[in-house]
Image (spheres, rainbow, N blue to C red):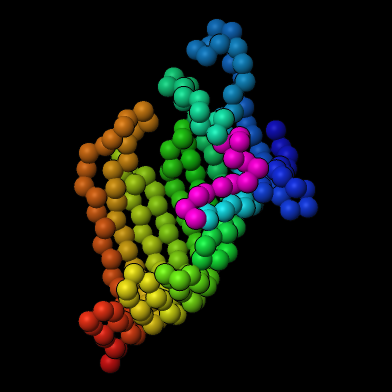
Amino acid sequence: FVGRITVGDPDDPDVRIDRVVVDYDIGLPWSKDGMGVSPRRVVLTRPLIKAQWLDGQFSLGSLDPLIKEFTSKPPSADKRGPLIVVSKGQALLTTDYGLVTLRADARIDDGRLKTLTAELPPSALDHANLNAAGLSAKLQAQEVDGRLVFAGHALADAFRGAGVQSQKLDLNFEGGVPYPANGAKKALGAVVLKADLTADALSGEGFAAQAA
């Protein structure tokens, strides 16, 4: 199957995928799963998703009923999920802090995240509890030997939140967490996070620092 998908108002859709390619496996009567057709690989090129995260509630608009129905069904333990490849994805997220744009490429195999590259282009956030100007970030994550390892970089011209104010903030971080196998409720292992933060100016209750 090759096509284009639009969900919601055609003039302002909640979801638009410029190109969808689905490869299928055809099951024969004597195969393990019996006769039928199941997706083996799904490639989504330039998908655009609009969502809201307001007052602590997340919504995907007209997709909400479909997601509720899908997630209400227990996953099939004996049937493998397809490989899903997301290329040049974009999400427009309306939040209490303003409109946030996220870009991402990802590979998901049998319901498991294999690789993720995500980017927050320069943005401004404005809220009573948090303000940020010139905020940008990049994140990379991948599954390695039963763990999800990640690394990222964030910049902000100015930031105020959680009792801290900063100018020219530069944050680098990396780490890893246990990644349970499909069907497992938990996984054992260390949670690791390393971070390196620099700023031209940093202040909070009872302290202040300035770059020399």
Going by the picture, which residue comes out furthest to the top? 30
3 left or right, relative to 134: right
State the residue in front, 198 or 58.
58
From the viewer's perspective, is residue 159 above or below residue 67?
below
User: What residue is rendered at 40% in x and 52% in y?
Assistant: 141
From the viewer's perspective, is residue 124 above or below residue 59?
below
State the residue in front, 97 or 3.
97
6 left or right, relative to 166: right
User: What residue is rendered at 28% in x and 43% in y?
Assistant: 178
What percent of the width, then of the height, locates residue 4? 73, 43
What percent of the width, then of the height, locates residue 191? 24, 50
User: What residue is rendered at 71% in x and 37% in y?
Assistant: 2
From the viewer's perspective, is residue 131 above or below residue 33?
below
66 inside magenta stretch: yes
From the viewer's perspective, is residue 14 above or below residue 171?
above
Quadrant of the snapshot with the C terminus = bottom left
143 left or right, relative to 105: left
**Residue 159, located in which quarter of the rendered image?**
bottom left
What percent of the width, then of the height, locates residue 103? 55, 58
What percent of the width, then of the height, locates residue 74? 46, 24
8 left or right, relative to 142: right
State the residue in front, 39 or 204.
204
Look at the image and give the residue range highlighted in magenta.
55-67
The answer to whether residue 127 is seen in the rendering is yes
